[in-house]
Amino acid sequence: MKSAVLGAGSWGTTFAQVLCDAGTETVLWARSPEAAETINARHENPRYLPGISLPLSLTATTDLPAALDGADIVVFAVPAQTLRSSLAEWAPHIPPGALLVSLMKGIELDTCKRMSEVITEVLAVPRQRVAVVSGPALAREIAERQATTASVVACEDEADAQLLQQACHTPYFRPYSSTDVVGCELAGTGKNVIALAVGIAVALGLGDNAKATLITRGLAEIARLGEALGASFQTFAGLAGMGDLVATCSSPLSRNRTFGQHLGQGMTFEQAKAATSQTAEGVTSCAPMIQLARKHGVEMPITEVVAAVIAGELPVRDAVSVLTSRSAKPEWYGSDADGA
């Protein structure tokens, strides 16, 4: 079995390492000739994963047709908002019948489409050929081969979910299979937005009670949206939901939490963007997530506040008072009234 990973950022490089360590022949495509040369010569990606020794079996290239030639699994690892234009460029070279895998955790601006939907639309392939990887995925810890990271690989075709599961199963990376693509994608996107809120709270000096409240109520609102879009409620209680949310909101390695902290410390949007350096997907995904929520009549108060802060419509220091001034409600409410 051969795989091609398109995108040599931190998560793309790390997942290529995982595939190699699982015994899957893997080629990593990079836009930068310097990055490809360094990975091949020094077995390292110093820009994104300094100090990490990559497998000797991992090869990198800037030659897209060569990377995709004969690939059974094609993995997309680029910023969410660039996926559509990248797919248009890659489409002629993607092997027919390959399993297409999204590592992105975001929602497209303007269209409000999940990444799997963008892939099926641009490449004109059935949904059953698209898989996603979700769950706790702090790239640095996985690249260091810290035992044990558990994650979720989801595909509507259960056999393909299991194929991907086998292709990336290592002693330090344990993937569980799922058929709930919608739930995994919404959980992966929503947790980035909640991590922004947690980062702001940390910078404002709020304590563990506040962080716990944001995490649990954040999970509730993500699950409400998931339920409205047909996702399984169980997904949000598992690795793709609670697992990824806790990791992203708790770790200083999280770009989204870090971005939120920068905002909470008084940085402007542009200053926070420059200081974070890598893409914080929650920044661009919060607005389309709110559009989805409003379309389906779902309340997402934390996401609403984060979106307003990002858009410059709400001062950071007013964010807390907006949330705390909400009217009292039952803990569980949603489309089933007394349910989620």
Image (cartoon, rainbow, N blue to C red):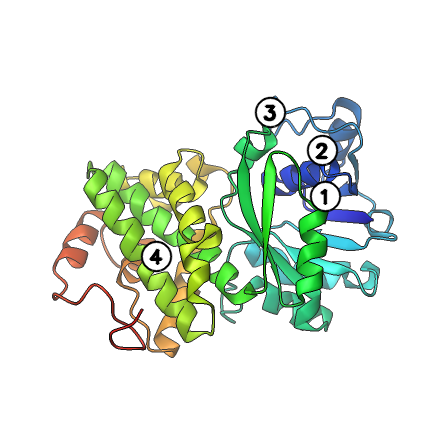
| Residue 330 percent location from the top left of the image | 17, 67
Type of amino acid under label 2: Ala
Q: Secondary structure at mark 2?
A: helix
Pointer 1 residue? 31
Q: Secondary structure at mark 4?
A: helix
Are the residues flagged by discs 3 and 4 in contact, CB closer than 8 Å?
A: no
Q: Nearer the viewer, residue 231 or 69?
A: 231
Pointer 4 residue? 219
| Residue 84 percent location from the top left of the image | 64, 63
Query: In the image, 95: left or right of 81?
Result: right
Dot 2: within a 10 Å radius of its alpha carbon, few (fewer than 14), some, or many (20 or more) residues?
Answer: many
Pointer 2 residue? 35
Q: How many marks?
A: 4
| Residue 275 percent location from the top left of the image | 42, 35
Q: Mark number for residue 50?
A: 3
Q: Is residue 294 visible?
A: yes
Are the residues flagged by discs 2 and 4 in contact, CB closer than 8 Å?
A: no
Looking at the image, which residue is at 32% across and 77% down?
A: 335
Q: Nearer the viewer, residue 79 or 336?
A: 336
First reached walking from the N terminus: tag 3 or tag 1? 1
Are the residues flagged by discs 2 and 1 in contact, CB closer than 8 Å?
A: yes
Give the CA separation, mark 2 to mark 4.
37 Å
Dot 4: within a 10 Å radius of its alpha carbon, few (fewer than 14), some, or many (20 or more) residues?
Answer: many
First reached walking from the N terminus: tag 2 or tag 4? 2
First reached walking from the N terminus: tag 4 or tag 1? 1
Query: In the image, 161: left or right of 42?
Result: left
Type of amino acid under label 4: Leu
